[in-house]
Image (spheres, rainbow, N blue to C red):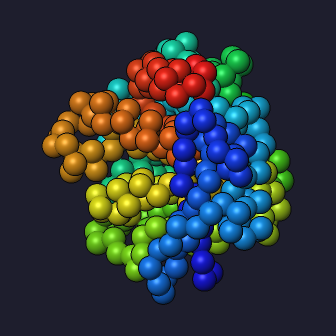
């Protein structure tokens, strides 16, 4: 790809003539940054953005798992694991995980993401049977409520068992690379899926991440994964993309991606952002304990919403809901 167009997002209530809505949502842009691997960036008017880019940037996003994408949505994290980076062991038992899921739903989660395998740096892969034993009882207990349930897995066998238990969304950190059966299953089942960017695997991603241009490299790799999903029979209308903050990136890589998130609207899919309690917050603000990173998590989440991010994946639903409600009230976008 020669040129890329990053919309310069705005949330002001006064929208100038000729401005375009970003993904049919709450932000708009009158200008974009034209990016290239060969030359300097240039700011251009929205009217100068090529039609194919303009169509992808502006088209309203279809609902995902029954959730309209016309307002920011909160995905609550439930890690049924002994070793996740932030809350490993807190909800490893079924009863504790179910109680946490219900508490997050009561606090305002729009969807619950249930995971049974840690993908923290240097984590080892576990057998599908072990992962199923962790997540399926929790999903079965939560799936009958009004809040839809997602399964955080990269394995088709786990996805199938989870969907049979009531999950309605698959969150695959490998973007369909890990298990060659996953794409076929998701297409066959008619499910929505999140494709996340990760350089390497959880076991290797923190060793020495390198990019020629982290923003454009991640964009191109996600574009390739979206194309692969479509080729497997998963329509773009059922695909969510996640730039994978912290997954095979240094702190500086993460910051570059976060400053330029609006570029990923060019993929024509809703964007999921997972920054809750992540290690790069420590690198910026010197907060070594993951559970003390709520203020940083909120700041970055709201910065994502200002760029039109549709789904925030977070541990702290009540606090994020409050921050989001106030943010949207003062920007005139409603609660």
Left or right of 204 in this view: 335: right
Q: Nearer the viewer, residue 8 or 194?
A: 8
Residue furthest to the bottom in view is 38
Q: In terms of image quadrants, where is residue 290?
A: top left
Q: Position of residue 270 (x, y in %)?
A: 66, 48
Q: Residue, x 64% and y 40% (percent of image)?
A: 15
For residue 260, side relative to residue 148 (left or right): left
Figure check: 327 above or below 230: above
Would residue 201 be seen by someone viewing this image from the given angle? yes
Q: State the count of labels.
A: 0
Q: Is residue 128 left or right of residue 183?
A: left
Residue at 81% x, 57% y is 235
Residue 169 in sight here:
no
Q: Residue 38 or 252: which is nearer the viewer?
A: 38
Residue 79 higher or lower than 62, as above or below = above
User: In terms of image quadrants, where is residue 5?
Assistant: bottom right
Percent coordinates x, y for residue 234 in the rendering: 79, 58
Q: Position of residue 199 (x, y in %)?
A: 44, 68
Q: Residue 27 location in percent, x, y? A: 61, 42
Quadrant where the N terminus sits is bottom right
Residue drawn at point x = 64 percent, y = 72 percent? 224
Q: The C terminus lies in which quarter of the figure? A: top right
Reply above or below: 108 against 84: above
| Lateral position of residue 255 relative to residue 147, left or right | left
Q: Residue furthest front?
A: 17
Say which residue appears at 33% left-offset and 44% top-offset: 278
């Amino acid at each position: 790809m020669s040129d890329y167009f990053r919309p310069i997002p705005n949330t002001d209530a006064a929208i100038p003539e000729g401005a375009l809505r970003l993904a049919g949502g709450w932000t708009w842009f009158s200008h974009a940054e034209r990016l290239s691997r060969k030359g300097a960036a240039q700011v251009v008017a929205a009217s100068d953005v090529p039609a194919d880019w303009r169509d992808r940037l502006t088209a309203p996003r279809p609902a995902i798992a029954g959730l309209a994408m016309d307002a920011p949505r909160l995905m609550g994290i439930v890690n049924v694991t002994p070793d996740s980076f932030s809350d490993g062991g807190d909800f490893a038992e079924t009863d504790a995980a179910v109680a946490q899921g219900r508490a997050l739903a009561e606090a305002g989660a729009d969807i619950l993401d249930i995971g049974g395998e840690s993908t923290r740096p240097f984590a080892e892969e576990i057998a599908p049977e072990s992962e199923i034993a962790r997540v399926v009882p929790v999903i079965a207990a939560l799936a009958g409520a009004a809040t839809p349930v997602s399964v955080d897995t990269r394995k088709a066998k786990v996805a199938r068992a989870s969907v049979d238990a009531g999950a309605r969304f698959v969150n695959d950190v490998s973007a369909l690379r890990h298990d060659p059966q996953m794409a076929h299953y998701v297409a066959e089942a008619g499910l929505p899926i999140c494709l996340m960017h990760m350089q390497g695997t959880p076991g290797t991603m923190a060793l020495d991440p390198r990019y020629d241009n982290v923003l454009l490299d991640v964009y191109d790799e996600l574009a390739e994964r979206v194309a692969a999903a479509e080729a497997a029979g998963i329509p773009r209308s059922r695909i969510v993309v996640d730039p994978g903050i912290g997954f095979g990136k240094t702190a500086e890589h993460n910051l570059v991606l976060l400053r330029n998130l609006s570029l990923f609207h060019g993929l024509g899919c809703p964007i999921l952002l997972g920054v809750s309690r992540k290690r790069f917050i420590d690198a910026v603000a010197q907060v070594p304990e993951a559970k003390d990173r709520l203020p940083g998590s909120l700041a970055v989440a709201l910065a994502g919403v200002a760029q039109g991010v549709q789904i925030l994946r977070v541990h702290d639903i009540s606090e994020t809901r409050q921050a989001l409600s106030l943010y949207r009230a003062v920007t005139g976008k409603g609660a």
